[in-house]
Amino acid sequence: EPGTNPLIETQIIADIEALAGQYDIVIPFIHMGEQYQWVLPDVLIQLCRRMVDAGATTVATSHPHVAQGMEWYNNTPMIYGLGNFIYDQMFTVDTAQGHMVDLTFRGDRIVNFRMHPVEIEDFTQPRLLGPGETAAFMDRMWRSHDFMRDRG
């Protein structure tokens, strides 16, 4: 049934458990996090991990308008904060860039993933980043990843 699923952990976990019993691949795409922050708060990272423990294949998040890094949890990439794709926030490099994620499956397992960084031009046109731009984008992504790892 259509509608918004509020960020209520018991409801989300129950939904994932039910869906994982019916489908081979379940990927929650969650709208959460604090705007313009590079890293999700610990409480939200733990929630994403509980989603995988409940049967989600992986989890992707959006909302903060910046890319927030990623981590590996239970042999799956967790993609936090995809950043902006088509949006009117071109006031910083962080808000003008985001990424698409390409997942490859073998059965119900993710066997490969690839990030495709983009930058918004003219407020509505995503453009794939060139090699030097991609290196700078990935450097920011890995700094976020390292910060999450170092927090515990």
Image: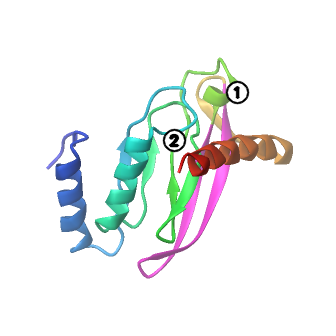
Which residue lies under the disc numbered 1?
93
The residue at the far bottom in this view is: 107
Residue range (magenta): 98-121
* x then y, percent, for residue 42: 44, 43
Dot label at residue 8: none
Identity, as a three-letter code, of the amino acid under mark 1:
Val
Decide whether residue 24 is among the magenta residues: no
Majority secondary structure of magenta residues: strand
- Residue 30 position, x and y percent, is 36, 45
Marking on residue 81: 2
Count the labels in the image: 2
Question: Which comes before the other along the chain, label 2 or label 1?
Answer: 2
Viewer-nearest residue: 17 or 88 = 17
- Membership of 113 in magenta stretch: yes
**Distance of label 2 from label 1 (alpha carbons):** 15 Å
Q: Residue 67, how many percent across, how many down?
A: 59, 39
Q: Measured from the top left, where is residue 143 in percent x and y? A: 69, 43
Q: Residues within 10 Å of mark 2 (few under 14, many from 20)?
A: many
Looking at the image, which residue sits at the far left? 1
User: Along the horizontal axis of the image, is 128 left or right of 68?
Assistant: right
Label 2 secondary element: loop
Which one is in front, 55 or 121?
55
Q: Does residue 121 appear to the left or right of 78 in the view shown?
A: right
